[in-house]
Image (cartoon, rainbow, N blue to C red):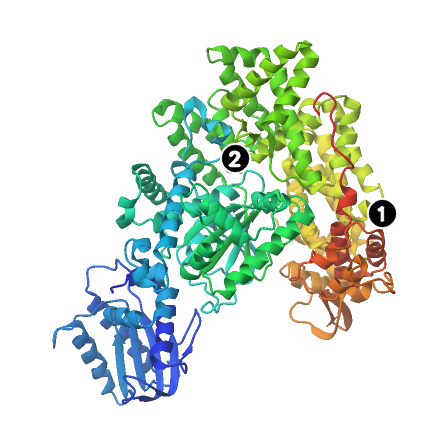
Amino acid sequence: MDYDLTRLGWREFEHLSQALAKCVLGPGVSVFGDGKDGGREATFAGQVPYPNEQQVWDGYGVIQAKFRQRSQGVSSGTEWLERQIEAEFKAWLHPDSKRGRMPEYLVFTTNVPLSPVPETGGIARVDRLISSYSENSKVTLKGWSVWHGDEICRFLDIHEGVRRAFAHFITPGDVLSRLLTTVSDADAETAELIRAHAGRALLSDQWVRLGQAGAQTDDQKTRLGPVAVDLRATFGERDTRPQAEQAPIYQDGPKSYSTRVAAYVLERGDTVLRPSRYTSAEARNVVLIGGPGQGKSTLGQLICQAYRVALLDEEGEHLLTIEARTVLRALRRNFAEIGLQPPQGRRWPIRIALNQYANAILGGEDISLLRFLADRVGHRSSVPVTSIHIKRWLRTWPCLLVLDGLDEVVSRQMRDEVMSRISDFLLETRQIDADLLVIATTRPQGYKGEFHSGDYETLTLVPMPDSDALHYAERLAAARHRDDPDMRDTVLERVSTAISEEGTTRLLRSPLQVTIMSLLVERRARLPQNRYELFDAYYDTIYAREVDKPGIIGQLLADHRLHIDWLHQHVGLLLQTRAAQSGELDAVIEDDELREHIRQRLYEETEDQNEAEVLASSLLEAATDRLVLLVAPNAGYIGFEVRSLQEYMAARALISGPEAEIVPRLESLAASYSWRNTWMLAAAGIFTHRPHLRSDLINALRALDSRDAVTMILVPGAQLALDLLDDDFTRHHPRFHNLLVDYATTLIGRPPRVDVLQRTAHSLTTAAQRHEQARVRIEHAIRDALSARDARLLTALGVLSHLARTTGPGSSSARRLLGTTTRNLRAKERAAAAVLSSQYLSGMIPDIPSGNFKVLGKSNLAQYLRDQLPVGELPEIHPLPLFLKALERHPVQQVQVEGITVPVVEPSIPLDSEGALAATGHPQSIEACINVINAQDITSWQITMAFTQLLDLLAYSSLMPPGDVNVTGTS
C-alpha cells in the first residue's frame, strides 16, 4: 500500500524513521530526542542484521532523516536529496566539525520517492554520490543505504506496530474508509459509528453559542466558521521558549511567552502521543484557563471542528449529506481565512461538558467516563454504542477529548469525584496505549490546579489586544451584515471608536464583550462604561427590538416588562443559588416548575386563576422564543444559553428588593468563589444604579475580613477590592477609587501567597500608573510593610520589584527604594527573599542570591501539624488521620542560603488531595492550620503560604452563605 508520508512533518518523520530503524536494524538502535542531534536521529554500535541475516553490518552506524515538505520549489526530489546528503558529508568533513567520529555505516531515510531506473534514476544517482564520498581518505564508510519513500512504504507494510502508531498521518485519502487496510484489528462497524458521530457533531457544532448576544436577530443564527478567530493565551513564566513550528510564539517579556491557542493545540496533536512512543518530558495535554466570555468553550468547539474537517476527508465527502458537505467545505474556507492550518494528524474529536457528566453521577449513576463517552457518541445513533466500541477505537485511532467547563462543577465534593473518574479513564487509556490528547477548560476563579501540571500544560487566555478585538468585530460584522454593507461599516466605525477610547476599550477584551458591543452600536450611540452597563444595555436593546416589532408578542412584552424582568432575575438567582449551594449542576429549571412560579406571581397580581395561567404561558413563550436569553436546551427544561447572562440576571436580583438588605446580602456572598463573577456584576450595578450604597459596600469588605480568625488570614474582602480595581468602574469616582486602593493595599501587609502576590503587584502597579493619589497610597503601604521586618516585608519587596520595572510614574523612586531596602536586609530577610525571588519572581529582586541552594535535609508538611493534631487512638478513616497522612506526601526541603536555613515546599504537588479534603470544615484542622500560620517567622514564609492555602480549602464551606439566597420580590 502507498502511504501519505508528506503529512508527517519533519518531527514525526524523524520519529517514524527511528521506529522503523529499531524494527529493521534491531533493538540495539539508540534514538535521540528533538533538538540538536549532531547529525543523527539514531545510532547503533556492533552487529545489526542488515541488509539481511546472512550479511550483517558490524560497526558504528548513523541514521539520518531527510523530510521534504510538499512544496519546495521546482527542483526534483532527487536533486533536493542530493543537496541534503552533500551538506551532511561537508559537515562531517569540516575541520571544525563537532559531530564526533565518522560513521562506518550510514542510513538516510526520506519521504522522497526515488526512481529505480538503472544509471539515470534517483536511486542510482544518490548511490553514486555517496560512493564518491566513500572514496575520500577521511571517510570510513563500509556500507550505506537510502530508505526512500517507496521503501519506507514497504517497511510499513511489514511492521504493523509502526503503521498503527502513525496511521492518522500516513493513511491516504478517506482515512475511515481505508482504515481496515492500515490497522488489521480495526473493525468496520466502529469506523462507521465514528464517521456517523463526526458527521452529526459537524452539524450540531456549526453554530456559535450566544446565538448569543443577539446573533439570532432577524431570524438568523451565527455560524462558527465565518466569525471564528484564534485567541491568544500565555504560557505563564518559563525559562525556555516553547517549541512550535507552525503555531506563532510571541515573547511578551522576560520568561513570558504566548501563542494562538487553536494553532498550538493542533500542532500539539501532530505528535504521536501513545505512551509506548511518547518519550518527551513535556506534558502532553493542555488545560485552558479563561474568565467568563473569553472564549474557552468556543475554542474547544473550533478545535474539534478543525479535526472533523481533516477526518472527513474530501474523498469521503460522498458519504455525507448535502448539508454536511456544505458545512465541511465552508469550514475549510473559513479556517484558511484566519490562517488556521489543518491538522496533519487526523484525530477523532469528542467534546464533553463536565457539568453534564457530573449530573449523570449526581443522578445516582455509577458511570465511568468511558461509558459516558459511549452514551454521548451513541446519542441519536441508530446503532447502540457501547464502551467496548469506544475502547476499541481508542486503541485503534488517535483521539482528541475536550473536557469543557470544570468551573461549572461547583460542588467541591463532586469536582473531586469527577476528577477521580477522569484519572481512572486516563489510566485505562494508557493501559491500552491510546494516542489521546486531552484539552480541559476552566475559569480561574476557584481553580485549584486539579489538572496536574505534570500531565497538563497550562495556557491562560489573555484580554484581547485591540487588534484582535477589531479583527473579531470585522468578521462578526461581515457575517451579520453581509447584505447590508452600510450597516457593517457603521458598526465597525463605532466599535473602532470604542476600542480607541479609554472609557470603553476595557469593555472589549473578550469575544462575548465584542459581540454584545457590536449589537449595541447598531442601535445606540452612547456606549456603556462598565460590565454591568454592558449587559444592561444589551438586555434593553434586544427588549426594545422585540417591542418595536408589530404583533401580539411585541405588545405583550411592552405591557408586562416588570414581569419579564422578574422572570429573568428569578431564574438567574435560582439557578445560581442551586449551583453554588445544593450541588445541582445543570443550569436549567424544569419547564413546569418555572411555569408554576410565574403563575403564582401573576395570581398575586391578578387574583384570577385562569388569567394567571394563560398569561404565564404567554410570557414564558415570549421570553424563550423572542428575547432568547432563556432557551430550552432540552425538552421540558429552561435555562440561560450563556452563563454570563445568567450571572448578570442573578446580579440584578441581588441588588433588588429593600435597600437595607442589599449590602448585607452581598457581604454574605463575598467570600464564595462560585458567586464571584455575579458579585462583581452586582457591585458594578450598585455603582451604576445605587450610588448611595457605594460607601456601605466598601465598608462591607472590611467587615468581612474581621468576621473571624479565618477571614482575618484569608482577607477575601481585600482580594475583592483588588478585583474591583481591575474592573475599573471607579475610574470616574476618585474618592471611591482611593478607598479601594487603601483597602487593597492591606494585601501588601500580609505574608506572601504567590498567586495573590502576583495579582496584587500587577493590579496595584496599574492603579499607581493611572492615579497619582493611588501611587502615593501604594508607596506608603509598601514602606509600612518594609518596616515590619517580618514576612510582610517579602510581599512588599515583590510589589516594589514589579513597580520598579515599569516606566510609568513613580518607577524611579521605586527603584531607589528597592535598592536601599535590599542593601539593608538582615541575614534571615535576605535568605527568605532569595527563595522568593529565584523560585517565583524570576530573579526580579536585585542584588539577591539566586540559583541552586544546598539541601540540608527533608521533611513534610505533616510534621508542622503533629503537635497541633494529636490523633491518638482515632481510626484511620477519621478525617484527621487522613489529613495528616495526605500531608506526609508533601515534601519540605531544608535549604541553606548564605548560612541561613529556609524551608522550601515542593510547589508541583497539589494540596487538594482527597485525604486533605477529608478534613474540610473540621474545626480542629482549621484551628491547627491557623496556629501553624501564626507560629512561623520570615524564613518559614513558604510554610505560612502552604497552610494558608490549606486553610482556604478547609474553611471554604464556612465562608459560604447559610441557606438559600432570598430577595424580597424576586425569590
Q: Which mark is residue 896?
A: none
Which three-letter amino acid code belongs to the residue tagged 1?
Ala
Q: Which mark is residue 512?
A: 2
Query: What x and y, as percent, mark residue 910?
Result: 67, 58
The answer to whether residue 73 is above or below residue 415 is: below
Which residue occupies 37% across, 57% down?
345
- Considering depth in this image, is 90 or 694 the residue closer to the camera? 694
The answer to whether residue 68 is above or below residue 292 is: below
Q: Secondary structure at mark 2?
A: helix
Quarter of the C terminus within the rendering: top right
Asked if the residues shown at circle 2 and circle 1 are in contact, with their CB atoms under 8 angstroms apart, the answer is no
Asked whether residue 231 is in view, the answer is: no
The residue carrying pointer 2 sits among few (fewer than 14), some (14 to 19) or many (20 or more) residues within 10 Å by Cα, namely: many
Quarter of image, res 109? bottom left
Quarter of image, res 76? bottom left
- Residue for badge 1: 709
Cα distance, mark 2 to mark 1?
39 Å
- Considering depth in this image, is 658 or 395 the residue closer to the camera? 395
Q: Earlier in the sequence, mark 2 or mark 1?
A: 2
- Considering depth in this image, is 835 or 624 the residue closer to the camera? 624
Q: Secondary structure at mark 1?
A: helix
* Residue 351 appears left or right of 323: right
* Residue 74 appears left or right of 179: left
